[in-house]
Image: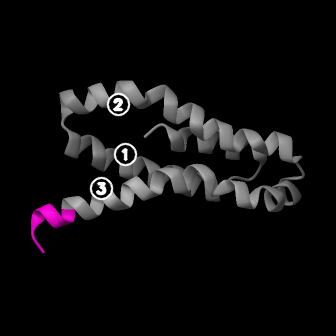
Amino acid sequence: MNQKKYIFLAVLISSFMCPFLSISVNVAIPSMAAEFGSNATELGWAVTSFLLGSASVLLPCGRLSDILGRKKLFRRGVAAVAASSLLCGLSPNAEMLIASRSFRGFP
């Protein structure tokens, strides 16, 4: 497999992950409400915080990728998504989950 195919595969997977990460939590809201003892409205912020984080850094990250290089920023973004996914999975309460989901939207 040559380098162009690897690049295409990386872009394809990351293009799938963004919408998947933003809406996958909708399925788990009832389970999280029972686990954290929160209502569904409060956990709705877990969905919204990802979108707010994503929208707030979209333009600055585009400019930063022009300055630093797309490959370098892409690698850092993938690492940040992995770290924030770990934080989301280890969240002990709803507030930490909301903060972790917001951080997940930043890269």
Q: Name the residue nearer the viewer: 35 or 28.
A: 28
Q: Is residue 11 left or right of residue 59?
A: left
Quarter containing the C terminus: top left
| Residue 30 x %, y % | 83, 58
**Disc 1 designates what residue?**
77
> Earlier along the polypeptide chain: callout 2 or callout 1?
2
Q: Quadrant of residue 42?
A: top right
Label 3: how many Cα within 10 Å (few below 14, some 14–19, many 20+): few
Disc 3 or disc 2, which is closer to the eye?
A: 3
The label shown at residue 31 is none
| Residue 51 x %, y % | 58, 37
Was residue 3 drawn as part of the magenta stretch in this picture?
A: yes
Q: Separation of disc 2 and disc 1 at Cα?
A: 10 Å
Q: Separation of disc 3 and disc 2 at Cα?
A: 16 Å
| Element under disc 1 | helix
> Earlier along the polypeptide chain: callout 1 or callout 3?
3
Q: Mark 3 near mark 2, Cβ–Cβ under 8 Å? A: no
Q: Is residue 77 left or right of residue 50?
A: left
**Which amino acid type is shown beneath numbered disc 2?**
Cys
| Residue 91 x %, y % | 68, 52
**Chief SS of the magenta region:** helix
The label shown at residue 11 is 3
Say if 105 sits above or below 19 in the image.
above
Q: Is residue 58 left or right of residue 74?
A: right
Q: Residue at x 64, y 39 (%)?
A: 99
Q: Please provide the residue range marked out in magenta.
A: 1-6
**Disc 2 designates what residue?**
61
> Earlier along the polypeptide chain: callout 3 or callout 2?
3
Label 2: how many Cα within 10 Å (few below 14, some 14–19, many 20+): some
Quarter containing the N terminus: bottom left
